[in-house]
Image: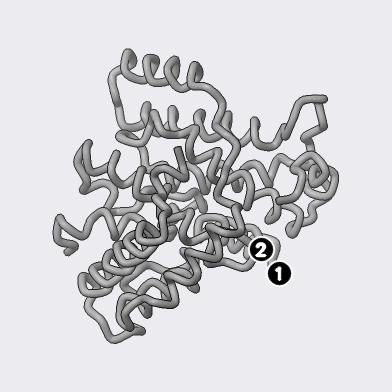
Amino acid sequence: MIPPESLQEAALTAWRPQDPVGAIRPHPAWADLDHAGRLALYEATIRARVLEAALNLNGLTPTGRAVMARILRRAGT
Amino acid sequence: MMDPDALLPAIAAGDDQAFEAWLAGAEHRVRLSLRRFAAYVDTEAVLQEALLRVWQVAPRVKADGQHDPLLRLAIRIGRNLAISDLRRARLTPVDVEELERLAASDPGPPEPRVGDPLLRRTIRECRDLLPTKPGLALTARLQNAGTEPDNALAVRLGMRLNTFLQNITRARRHLEDCLRRRGIDLVVELA
């Protein structure tokens, strides 16, 4: 159980569950956020990804790396 | 940052490294295009799914004389996915149509400024000043890059999940405070 004050941080990760056919689904913590919390999460994610891209040699955010990992996994490489 | 139009032939031919280079420049702009939907759909999930679909259809994308056709495609796919999620969430049809109309009338996203080398260097210097536990938690998340849930990362660091999350929040706060002391406000940089 994630306490309310940590829901935003929990949903800030780039990790997302997949459904049985491999589609990317919402983070469980996102569903527990209210309207204002979701808007705040969106703005916080923009700031976070800028910081995170700067800390990656190729300028990729965790979002970009998660996408590339799925592409490479599907390609079997 | 590579010219996205120069990358298109390699991406269409299935070159994943070329796609990665395009992704580094495009992600921020696609995310901005989803702002109208942020209260109703998980834009992170929509964004990742849209970028994956761009990769899947890229072999059929042709240069059309306009700048960066893949970016325009990604924005269109992202909005369509968001609208599908909205319909699935049974938002009233009026709300969906209104959001769709507003999103379509949004101006195109601005050129990103986040590739600025000075900004990148300053962020790295501030990262090196993080206290130990927040630094460890943030590093774990960054290294993992969304391949595992936070529960798994917290266990590996010997932290409870909520402690892990609190440490990452502290790390972000330290980074943003450090940047402000050096005259950088991320909100202004992204405006």
Residue toward you, B42 or B134: B134
Q: Which residue is mark 2?
A: A72
Q: Which mark is residue A77?
A: 1
**Counting other residues with Cα less than 10 Å from the Cα at mark 2, is it few (<14), some (14-19), or many (20 or more)?**
few
Whether discs 2 and 1 lie on one chain: the answer is yes
Q: For mark 1, give the secondary structure.
A: loop
Q: Position of residue B86 (x, y in %)?
A: 36, 29
> From the viewer's perspective, is B47 left or right of B54?
left
In the depicted view, which residue is nearer to us: A9 or B189? B189
The answer to which quarter of the image holds residue B58 is top right
Name the residue at 78% across, 36% down: B60
Q: Would residue A66 be visible to someone looking at this image?
A: no
The answer to whether B19 is drawn above or below residue B177 in the figure is above
Tell me the subunit letter for badge 2. A
> Element type at marker 2?
helix
For disc 1, the chain is A
Count of residue discs: 2
A12 lies above or below B51: below
Within-10-Å neighbours for mark 1: few <14, some 14–19, many 20+: few
In this rendering, is residue B92 above or below B141?
above
- Where is residue B122? Give x, y as percent: 50, 64
**Residue B59 shown left or right of residue B188 in the figure:** right
Of the numbered discs 2 and 1, the one sitting upstream in the chain is 2
| Type of amino acid under label 2 | Leu
The tag on residue B80 is none
Q: Are marks 2 and 1 in contact (CB under 8 Å)?
A: yes
Give coordinates of residue A21: x percent, y percent: 51, 51
- Residue B140 lies left or right of residue B160; in this view the side is right
Instruction: Tell me how far mark 2 sits from mark 1, CA to CA.
Output: 5 Å
In the image, residue B173 sits, relative to residue B19, either above or below, namely below
